[in-house]
Image (cartoon, grey):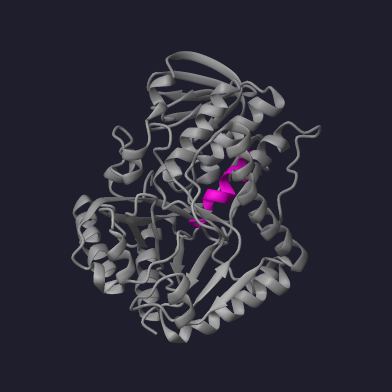
């Protein structure tokens, strides 16, 4: 199976109709698609945060000849259309689950890397002049049901006492004074790292920085065939071919099973959906006691995530749909609009102006995959961010660049939680049906 969902989910010929597209100038005209036969030292497949960060650090810090192949325009994938949440953590395992599987020290290393990833974005913004509209201070997790507040208390204890990450708990009444009120607000946890941002502006900024330092970027250059010619890789695109000594796979949720046998069946892409409203007035914001610029998610297994944008539009997102068909997209937009009004009743008649969706990436072991292939050490990879790639992916790109250019070209600085390939999903052709069953179970659990 080359792709899990309806072909429209993979149509890279047109921009995604996201709100971000209206705020950001598409830089693809400054770059060219592959045209004819070219060669380089390192080829990067995927022009999102991982690939662009790897290219930037390879070109800027190590003077490597690197070319980036992107199927759509720069930022076409999840890196340009996500909700703009820079927060923790790129796994679906709890802290206890991580400790049980990987041990205390490696869990601390993993969370340390997650915080480093957040700090890296601020460093890149300053060093490369990237204005990604940083917004808020830390992020909130809201108990959507009164029974879930105990989970927040446990998470606060684990983050602060075990991992040294500052947190603060708020009762329902206290959070209404600093955050918001709603029909699904029973207290909240503030984690004092992270912020909101404009994801497409981050993508565009990374692209410009990488290009300025000598990386070659090729939008509209989907890899159609990958083969070997001796020790070199041959990547055929519609307009030409790129030959490279080494390859980085950085395609995350848009990794197609027919790209390379090693990655077939390793990822489970899940559809995430977002709507935004028109700008809200100060009176409308006050009607729900909205007082924060920090991003918010809740404790649902099929979580809602939301934030107020710099122009006071309200962004509201959720998982859902297992087909990717355009008709299902229309139903998801209507459902999101209804649920937004259900959670925030004062806003139930406010129209949504934009709707879009994309793919997040889950792995069977529920943690990211970073490393190189055992049977071909010239192939490197970084993906599987479980909807928390904004901070993780640029850090992974930087660490891949360091590893590739190291004296022994060995993987360096990657916690065990993230290292190597996850096992394939059993019966990969049935992944979508398994996801559908999981969604039904999560919806039942979210009711209490």
Q: Residue furthest front?
A: 283
Q: Horizontally, is 287 left or right of 395 in the view? A: left
| Image-quadrant location for residue 274 | bottom left
| Image-quadrant location for residue 34 | top left
* Residue at image coords 35%, 63%: 433
Q: Horizontal and vertical percent for residue 346?
A: 25, 71
Q: Horizontal and vertical percent for residue 320?
A: 33, 62
Residue 369 visible, this angle: yes
Q: Residue furthest top?
A: 36
Q: Nearer the viewer, residue 372 or 313?
A: 313
| Image-quadrant location for residue 28 | top left
Residue 375 visible, this angle: no
Q: Horizontal and vertical percent for residue 73?
A: 38, 31
User: How many marks overall?
Assistant: 0
Asked if 402 appears above or below 236 in the picture, the reply is: below
Q: Give the dominant element type of the magenta stretch: helix, strand or loop.
A: helix
Q: Residue furthest right?
A: 407
Asked if 233 appears above or below 402 in the picture, the reply is: above
Q: Horizontally, is 444 left or right of 395 in the view? A: left
Q: Horizontal and vertical percent for residue 358?
A: 36, 49
Asked if 147 appears above or below 125 in the picture, the reply is: below
Q: Horizontally, is 340 left or right of 113 in the view? A: left
- Residue 429 counted in the magenta span: no
Q: Which residues are magenta?
A: 385-397
Q: Nearer the viewer, residue 127 or 57?
A: 127
For the C terminus, which image quadrant?
Answer: bottom left
Asked if 188 appears above or below 316 in the picture, the reply is: below
Q: Nearer the viewer, residue 46 or 336?
A: 336
* Residue at image coords 43%, 32%: 74
* Residue at image coords 44%, 45%: 198
């Amino acid at each position: 199976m080359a792709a899990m969902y309806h072909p429209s989910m993979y149509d890279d010929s047109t921009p995604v109709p996201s709100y971000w597209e209206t705020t950001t100038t598409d830089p693809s005209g400054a770059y060219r698609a592959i045209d004819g036969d070219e060669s380089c030292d390192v080829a990067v497949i995927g022009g999102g945060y991982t690939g662009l960060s790897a290219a930037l650090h390879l070109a800027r810090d190590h003077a490597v000849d690197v070319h980036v192949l992107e199927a759509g325009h720069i930022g076409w994938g999840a890196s340009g259309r996500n909700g703009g949440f820079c927060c923790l953590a790129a796994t679906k395992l709890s802290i206890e689950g991580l400790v049980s599987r990987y041990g205390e020290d490696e869990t601390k290393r993993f969370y340390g890397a997650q915080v480093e990833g957040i700090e890296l974005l601020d460093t890149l913004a300053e060093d490369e002049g990237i204005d990604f509209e940083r917004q808020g201070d830390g992020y909130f997790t809201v108990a959507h049901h009164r029974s879930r507040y105990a989970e927040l208390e446990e998470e606060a204890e684990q983050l602060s006492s075990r991992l040294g990450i500052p947190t603060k708990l708020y009762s329902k009444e206290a959070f209404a004074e600093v955050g918001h009120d709603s029909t699904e607000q029973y207290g909240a946890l503030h984690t004092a790292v992270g912020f909101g941002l404009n994801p497409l502006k981050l993508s565009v900024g990374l692209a410009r920085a990488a290009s300025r330092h000598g990386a070659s970027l090729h939008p509209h250059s989907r890899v159609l065939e990958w083969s070997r010619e001796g020790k070199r890789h041959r990547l055929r695109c519609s307009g030409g071919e790129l030959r490279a000594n080494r390859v980085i796979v950085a395609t995350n949720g848009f990794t197609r099973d027919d790209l390379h046998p090693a990655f077939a069946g390793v990822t489970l892409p899940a559809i995430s959906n977002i709507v935004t409203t028109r700008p809200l007035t100060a009176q409308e914001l006050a009607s729900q006691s909205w007082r924060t610029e920090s991003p918010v998610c809740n404790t649902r297994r099929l979580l809602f995530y939301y934030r107020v944008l710099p122009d006071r539009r309200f962004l509201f997102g959720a998982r859902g749909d297992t087909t990717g068909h355009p008709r299902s997209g229309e139903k998801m937009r209507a459902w999101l609009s209804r649920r937004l009004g259900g959670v925030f009743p004062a806003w139930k008649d406010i129209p949504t102006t934009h709707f879009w969706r994309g793919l997040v990436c889950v792995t069977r072991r529920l943690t990211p995959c970073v490393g190189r292939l055992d049977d071909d050490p010239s192939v490197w990879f970084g993906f599987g961010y479980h909807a928390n790639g904004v901070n993780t992916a640029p850090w992974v790109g930087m660490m891949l660049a360091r590893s590739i250019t190291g004296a022994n070209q060995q993987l360096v600085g990657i916690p065990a939680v993230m290292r190597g390939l996850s096992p394939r999903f059993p019966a990969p052709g049935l992944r979508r049906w398994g996801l559908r069953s999981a969604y039904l179970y999560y919806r039942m659990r979210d009711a209490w």
